[in-house]
């Protein structure tokens, strides 16, 4: 199934990229705990750099208290939404929408793994222009955004389809 393959690829690329950045590139000498602070900044392009930050909240650091109860609530919410998306994925019969849903699921699972492991999500991609900068993000966020964009594009561009096009 296209969607499950995309979910697996999204999860794998996200977790491998986070392992490389967190463990091999950004971890300061002698620091063993995670999450940790790293002041290292790697300029890749004049408008793009690697800069590790930990987000204990959700998008744009909302609910970023770092408390165990908040972490548990966010994990439960993310898990529930991901299960709903998996159920929905199974009902989709169009490869484009399966791929979109799979990307969202893979990204969500990547961030769930971080939250379950560290009670925070590792973000490290930073796009900026002069004094403006986009919030730091990771590959999981990229897959979620790409999947949502594909879904919206389908809703706007595809011929009208209804429940008859979904598996019953």
Image (spheres, grey):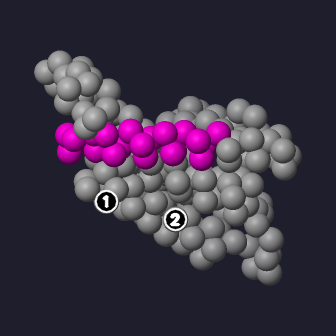
**Magenta stretch?**
77-98
Q: In the image, is 89 to the left or to the right of 105?
A: left
Q: Residue furthest bottom?
A: 30
Q: Which residue is mark 1?
A: 5
Q: Position of residue 86 (x, y in %)?
A: 43, 46
* Residue situated in front as seen by the camera: 151 or 165: 165
Total of numbered circles in the picture? 2
- The answer to whether 152 is drawn above or below residue 47 in the figure is above
| Label 2 CA crowd tier, 10 Å (few <14, some 14–19, many 20+) | many
Mark 2 highlights which residue?
15
Residue 35, horizontal then vertical, whole percent: 76, 62
Q: In percent of the image, x 56 and y 64: which residue is there?
A: 18
Q: Mark 1–mark 2 contact, CB under 8 Å?
A: no
Secondary structure mostly taken by the magenta-highlighted segment of the chain: helix
Q: Is residue 165 visible?
A: yes
- Residue 10 magenta: no
Image coordinates of residue 103 in percent, x first then y, are 38, 48
């Amino acid at each position: 199934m296209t969607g499950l393959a995309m979910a697996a690829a999204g999860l794998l690329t996200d977790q491998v990229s986070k392992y490389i950045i967190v463990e091999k590139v950004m971890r300061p000498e002698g620091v063993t705990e995670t999450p940790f602070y790293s002041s290292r900044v790697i300029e890749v392009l004049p408008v793009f750099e690697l800069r590790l930050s930990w987000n204990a909240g959700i998008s744009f650091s909302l609910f970023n208290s770092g408390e165990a109860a908040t972490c548990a609530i966010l994990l439960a919410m993310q898990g529930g939404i991901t299960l709903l998306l998996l159920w929905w994925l199974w009902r989709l019969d169009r490869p484009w929408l399966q791929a979109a849903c799979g990307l969202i699921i893979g990204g969500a699972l990547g961030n769930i793994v971080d939250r379950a492991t560290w009670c925070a999500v590792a973000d490290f991609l930073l796009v900026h222009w002069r004094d403006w900068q986009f919030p730091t993000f990771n590959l999981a966020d990229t897959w979620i955004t790409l999947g949502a964009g594909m879904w919206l594009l389908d809703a706007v561009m595809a011929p009208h389809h209804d429940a008859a096009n979904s598996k019953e």
